[in-house]
Amino acid sequence: MASDLAAELDFALSVADAADAYTLPHFQAHSFNVSLKENQTEVTEIDRGCETLVMDLIRSARPHHAWYGEEHGAGGSSLSEYTWVVDPIDGTSNFVRGVPVWATMIGLVHKDLGPVMGVVSAPALGMRWWGFVDGGAYFNGAPIHVSSVASLSEASLSITANSLWEKIGKTTHIDELTRSASRVRGYGDFWQHMLVAQGAVDVAVDAVGLEPYDIAPLLPIVQAAGGMLTNRKGEVDWRANTAISSNGLFHSHVIEILTRKS
């Protein structure tokens, strides 16, 4: 499979190049309109245009594959071996406000194995990560690996403690987690998980309310870098609504805190 995925990675990187060439000039010129989707999250015509661009390239080059995106939904054969999962702009709120922390995320999901390859391209930061099963993980072309920090008490933690954590009764658990770590920051969205993959952060706890396209591209990169990415219950599930990534050495401790009975 590794050789097949290497070819798919080359294709995905070329798609990311096209996406960057489309999104970055609009971000720099601030040339877009903003509206709200039904779920009250922000969207721009650049989100939709980027996804159309990406999916058109996929449909043209991989007509036998299926696809699923944030803005335009699913298509292709349900019997396909592979599905491309795309978030055209992860971090739209940052994009809208001129904060450079946003990325196009492209994942490849195998029907039996789950996410097997991912590309995360953040052109306003000049950063790109990628990785695939048995192929390693990379940041701007250099191999990366998770950290060797062995305990939560020594760890650098990134956390997105949105209101939905409180809604599911986990405020005290989040508070305990932040008190238990050595250093706490909130890098947010894709970036915190990619920082885990490259060993700059040791554990990242995302917001509640994620979608498959928020997770599928990240999972194989973190795994290929030697780390773990699970939901808040400790299960590897790219369709979950939460994502916890770490170097794996104290992942069970983080999950134990988040699942502890109040």
Image (spheres, grey):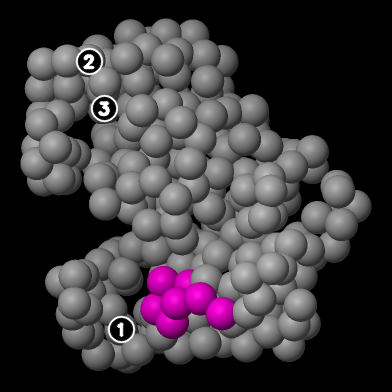
Question: Outermost residue toward the front?
Answer: 79
Q: Which residue is mark 3?
A: 184
Mark in the foreground, 2 or 3:
2
The answer to which image quadrant residue 183 occupies is: top left
Q: Position of residue 172 (x, y in %)?
A: 10, 22
Is residue 71 part of the magenta span, yes or no? yes
Q: Position of residue 7 (x, y in %)?
A: 85, 62
Front-lying residue, 142 or 113: 113
User: From which residue to which does the magenta span run?
Assistant: 69-75
Considering the numbered disc 3 on the image, is that residue within a helix, a strand or a loop?
Answer: strand
Q: Position of residue 258 (x, y in %)?
A: 26, 23
Give the crowd class for mark 3: few <14, some 14-19, many >=20 residues within 10 Å: some
Can residue 102 be seen by looking at this rendering?
A: no
Cα gap from disc 2 to disc 1, whole angstroms: 39 Å
Give the crowd class for mark 1: few <14, some 14-19, many >=20 residues within 10 Å: some
Q: Which residue is mark 1?
A: 44
Is residue 247 part of the magenta span, yes or no? no
Residue 258 shown left or right of residue 172 in the figure: right
Quarter occupied by the C terminus: top left
Q: Which residue is mark 2?
A: 260
107 w.r.t. 175: above or below: below
